[in-house]
Image: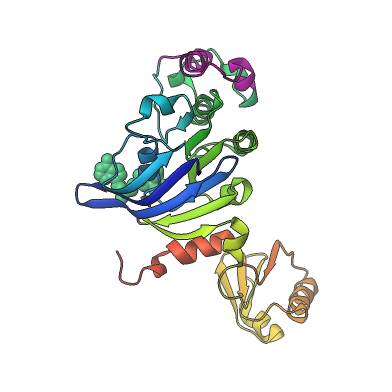
Amino acid sequence: MSAVSVAGLVVRYGRVTAVDGVSFDAHAGEVLALLGPNGAGKTTTVETLEGYRRPDAGRVSVLGLDPIADHAELTRHVGVMLQQGGVYPGIRAREALRLFAAFYHPDHEDPDELLDRVGLASVASSTWRALSGGEQQRLSLALAVVGRPRVAFLDEPTAGVDPGGRQVVRQVVRDLAGAGTAVVLTTHELEEVERVADRVVIVDRGTVVAAGTPAELTSSGAPVEEIRFGAPAGLDTAVLAVALGAAVEEVTPGEYRVDTAPTPAAVAALTAWLAEHDLSLADLRAGRQTLEDVFLRLTGPDSHPGAR
Ligand SMILES: Nc1ncnc2c1ncn2[C@@H]1O[C@H](COP(=O)(O)OP(=O)(O)OP(=O)(O)O)[C@@H](O)[C@H]1O
Ligand SMILES: [Mg+2]
């Protein structure tokens, strides 16, 4: 049995169809990322799984139960991190964690140890409203995991979190899955997905446009006949093009694309030219798509001819 199951989910806000036939499953011990641009329907999907919204069509179940009808039962087994707030502003960090742990979960993490793990030990007596945005995110995450949930819904757990904090968040998420929790998180950050997710469901405008492991998604599609590299901005691409016998384009300042098959000879010619001109090479990529390429191809403006 899947820990989380979504089948043909449709959710509307009046005339707006926010979720339009989304299906996916998440299993115990795995991190599933819902990846999509702003307004894709990620939060709406997760809120339906949390029992806060009623499907207009389709079915959702969590641990085989109905998120609305069985809400009280599920509360003990499900950890939730909302995209925004959800915590009483006057409560202190340690107090919130203790209250939450004791109230919902007989078998819970040690609140002080958890505060330490998410890097909040020094602000344990600060009220929610006095915490910085990133600290509030970390506390929300701690509140979602303190009860050792069997399923966790984390809506943008790394939004507004600094690089050190992201590492902490990733570690907490991986530990959670390692302990057997099914983790469903949302994000629009590709780096996050590549680092933390076992499986990815890409959503755009309420529908699933691709699904698979990060490796499956990046190896799908036609092989890419190009070389991409990073070098100082403003290179004379015309001169380089002559040297390589292929078109060269500066995609964004300092990021270049060579329109040629990524053969060893072509790569050698490129690096030789850079060396000759005493130019640094910041990055080199041959023939492999990144998740970002896939994401932009599937969700970018060009993917919807005539839309918007
Ligand atoms: N309460 C609401 N009333 C009306 N429309 C809403 C409401 N909540 C969301 N929407 C609309 O539904 C669509 C999906 O919103 P949702 O919040 O699920 O997207 P999201 O993928 O979580 O986006 P983000 O990355 O910005 O958090 C959007 O077009 C949004 O404007
Ligand atoms: Mg959202």
Q: For residue 106: magenta? A: yes
- The percent position of residue 24, horizontal first and vertical second, equals 45, 51
Q: How is the image coloured?
A: rainbow
Where on the image, by quarter, is ligand 2?
Answer: top left
- The foreground one among 108 and 140 is 108
Reply above or below: 24 against 184: below
Near-viewer residue (134 or 148) = 148
Instruction: Name the residue at 47% across, 30% down.
Output: 78
- Which quadrant of the view contains residue 238? bottom right
Residue 77 location in percent, x, y? 48, 28
Q: Position of residue 223 (x, y in %)?
A: 61, 75
Q: Residue furthest left?
A: 14
Q: Nearer the viewer, residue 54 or 201?
A: 54
Q: Locate residue 302: give its quadrant.
A: bottom left
Q: Is residue 115 above or below residue 228?
A: above
Q: Main secondary structure of the magenta part?
A: helix
Above or below, 160 against 99 in this view is below
Residue 108 left/right relative to 16: right
**Residue 42: percent from left, percent from top:** 40, 47
Give the extent of the magenta segment.
Answer: 90-116
- Identified at 54% across, 64% down, the residue is 293
Whether residue 100 appears in magenta in the rendering, the answer is yes
Horizontal side of 231 relative to 150 (left or right) equals: right
Task: Name which residue lies at 37% across and 38% down.
Answer: 47
The C terminus: image quadrant: bottom left
Please name whichever residue, 155 or 90, is drawn nearer the observer in this view of the structure: 155
